[in-house]
Image (cartoon, rainbow, N blue to C red):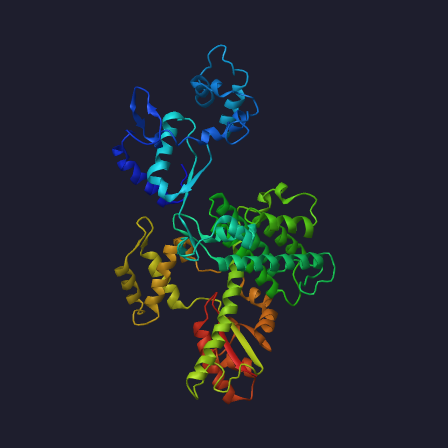
Amino acid sequence: MNTYNEETRHQFERTLGWLNQWACARTYGLGSKVPFDEKFLIESLSDSTIYMTYYTIAHYLHSSLDGTKPGLFNIAPEEMDDAAWDYVLLGKELPTGHSAADRLPELRKSFLYWYPLDIRSSGKDLIQNHLTFFLYIHTALFPDNLPLSVRCNGHLLLNGEKMSKSTGNFMTLRECVCKYGADATRLSLADAGDGLDDANFEESTANATILRLYTLYEWITDAVKAIRGEHAPEVKVRPADSPLTLIDRIFKSEIERLSKETERAYDKMLYRDALKTGFYDFLAARDWYREVTSAEGMHPSLVGTYIERQILILAPITPHWAEKVWVEVLGKPESIMKATWPAKEIPGTFDLPLLAAGEYIRDVVKAIRDAEAQLLKKKGGKKNVKGPAGPEFDPKAPKELAVCVAADFPEWQTVAVDAVKENYDADSDKFDDAAIRAALGKKGLLKDKKVMPFVQEIKKRVVLLGPTVAFDRALPFNELEVLYTIQNYILNSIGYQKVHIIDLSSVNDGEKGLASMLVGSGNESQVDIVAKEAKRAIDLAVPGQPGFIIRNI
């Protein structure tokens, strides 16, 4: 049986360990009398945990909640005797001449259609009583139709605190819907949390959701206009017949990956995870794509794919918003409720090199900004300290950036990785630390302060990623090709007048030669200043992590 998380299963198992001490009958309260001794009542949980079987046939028996109006088959209460229930729920034969024999087969059919029940959803406090009895009684009565899953949740907090009328921290579902609307309420509840931990409904999240959904609605409206060739200054797209660039293909792969992750989260009923990948991460991917392609524009076909996928993914959580965009903005002829999940459009595997290239681009842009921020911090902290561009560096003045790309890893890193790899036992998933240190000592690397922290990092990668990925450090993409692709993006978004992509394997004379490439001949004093930072960039650069030289021009 699927319990959706291990803690729910553990609580069930702990309860099963002591439940044999629970009395099966009592002498007072509500409940059914023991047939052979009516002074005792059957423990109420023993005969009140299969009411969901009644749901499967209730519409045939009555059409009003109080049972005063007959149901579809006009079956009288007295006709539902023990023989009728045994037939409908247990499949036993009906006595010959039973008054409802002509109608009861439909009830039996309905029961078998809905059973076994797919999911029983309830609170975590009922695991040790109601839900465990629910499993026991189903096992006793319906051994061939056992529940497929139980989904338990915690309690609901409001703004991080327990709800209480006495303190005023209280809100009914109706009040919430009236205040924030159905979709913002549903999205905020999905965002509140899954599992047995208490979920937290934040009113600030509900308010932000209203704005976020409206902003997305407006952007989609403008994007659809742009795709159709209408005036939409807020959304820039390029001609539809233009070829897909590396950035386009990265964005397409990210849409596919996030769609699959969201599908998996929905299948597991992890709505917070589905919201993260299918909404927040989806928006972040769009924002990144829009920013990186700001000069040439986004590809209209990918924008259209993104929009449809985003609406479909949000439909289970925000159905009213999705319906409005689907029908009114996209002009679809049918309701989104008739649309199908795009399973065939979502591949089971993804282009991992493209996804890695996308992550690399984000890391490089962040590293460039961090390098400049560190440069300014050094300048502001100490006077006359020559940082990457010397003491006169001014971030507001014209500046250039050199991105230094290494073709190979430093030899000491290769030796260290080999030492860890040779002394790792995959069967026990353990490292022989003494042997690793001995191997490094033979190579004379133990005195280098960089080595042991690097070894610890490799060991962490083995634990997180597995030995195959951790020990294979080769990049799955062409680093220089990716950097040339985003060269204009770096120029425009970070504000450099010049951006040089330098392959260090083609640089002669080390840091001196690199500095001469940037400064030019005939200015030896400036070459000497830049050479100091060039050496640092060369030393730091490894495949996947370039070094940087930043200076005014």
Q: Residue at x 31, y 39 (%)?
A: 13
Q: Residue at x 54, y 25 (%)?
A: 60
Above or below, 45 relative to 527: above
Which residue is at the front of the view, 172 or 319? Answer: 172
Q: Which quarter of the image is occupied by the N terminus?
A: top left
Q: Is residue 32 left or right of residue 504?
A: left
Above or below, 428 relative to 384: above
Give the percent coordinates (x, y) of residue 468. 41, 53
Which residue is at the front of the view, 469 or 298? Answer: 298
Q: How many marks?
A: 0
Q: Is residue 393 left or right of residue 3?
A: right
Give the percent coordinates (x, y) of residue 289. 59, 61
Which residue is at the front of the view, 210 or 392? Answer: 210
Give the percent coordinates (x, y) of residue 136. 35, 31
Q: Which quarter of the image is occupied by the C terminus?
A: bottom right
Q: Is residue 119 visible?
A: yes
Q: Is residue 257 visible?
A: no
Residue reaching furthest to the right: 230
Which residue is at the front of the view, 56 or 349? Answer: 56
Above or below, 396 relative to 249: below
Above or below, 246 relative to 116: below
Q: Is residue 133 left or right of residue 76?
A: left
Q: Residue at x 36, y 66 (%)?
A: 454
The answer to which quarter of the image holds residue 169 is: bottom left
Give the percent coordinates (x, y) of residue 473. 44, 60
